[in-house]
Image (spheres, helix red, strand yellow):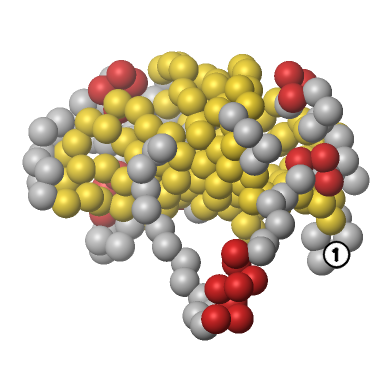
Amino acid sequence: MSRTVLALALAAGLGLGSMAHAQTATPPVAASAVAGTYKLDARHVGLVVRIGHGGGFSKSVFRFNTIDGQLGWDAASPAKIALSVNVDMKSIDSNVPGFAEELIGDRFLKTAQFPTATFVSTGIKQIDATHADVTGDLTFLGVTKPLTIHTELLGAGNNMRAVPTLGFTGTASFKRSDFGFNALLGPIGDQVDLLIDVEFNKAS
């Protein structure tokens, strides 16, 4: 599924008041979320994929809409943190009419044979209070290769419903040819860039 690359901007609340607020915002504290097992919130997850198009003239952008996963969290013992994620490959979305249906077929993603892609963490390298590199194994088209996700902790603590919640954004990239995905190499780029936004809620 792991800087990776994808630029999305969210602009809101223009004006001096909101600018002052942004300048004094308090960074999230990892210890604010209690240790335990957290489930991925399917309503608040996004996986955006960006790949070169037309031999480099532009980028094509896709989104996977159906993802599930689990996070074992312990801020006091980062070595115990464990992440596993499953992506439904048939859930790919494109703004080009009919292209998603073509992508899930045998020419490209071969979802009848490989319905899911998975990421399972193997280690974490803490960068600072809110950034870490999560290393793990990405299995895509039946091939497993190492992948590093560069993550940022966006929020930690109880959400508005008093449920312990963790929110992250992350980026990663890999070469699709490393996974045997060679369809139209050249006209379609080899490097795949990922942007991941996700919330995890503590399991009851």
Residue 25 location (% of width, % of height) = 67, 62
Amino acid of disc 1: Arg
Q: Is residue 92 left or right of residue 75?
A: left
Determine which quarter of the picture holds residue 71: top right
Quadrant in which the C terminus appears = top right
Dot 1 corresponds to which residue?
161
- Residue at (20% x, 43% y) in the render: 52
- Residue at (84% x, 56% y) in the render: 158
Q: Residues within 10 Å of mark 1 (few under 14, many from 20)?
A: few
Q: Is residue 111 left or right of residue 46?
A: left
Residue 154 location (% of width, % of height) = 64, 51
Measured along the vertical axis of the image, is residue 91 above or below residue 109?
below
Residue 111 location (% of width, % of height) = 40, 36
The number of numbered badges drawn on the structure is 1
Measured along the vertical axis of the image, is residue 191 above or below residue 178?
below
- Give whichever of 167, 40 is nearer the camera: 167
Residue 69 location (% of width, % of height) = 66, 38
- Residue at (30% x, 40% y) in the render: 105
- Residue at (55% x, 73% y) in the render: 19
Measured along the vertical axis of the image, is residue 82 above or below residue 107?
above
Q: Is residue 176 left or right of residue 156?
A: left
- Give whichever of 186, 23 is nearer the camera: 23
- Give whichever of 114, 124 is nearer the camera: 124
Measured along the vertical axis of the image, is residue 180 above or below residue 159?
above
Secondary structure beneath disc 1? loop
The answer to whether residue 159 is seen in the rendering is: yes
The answer to whether residue 68 is seen in the rendering is: no
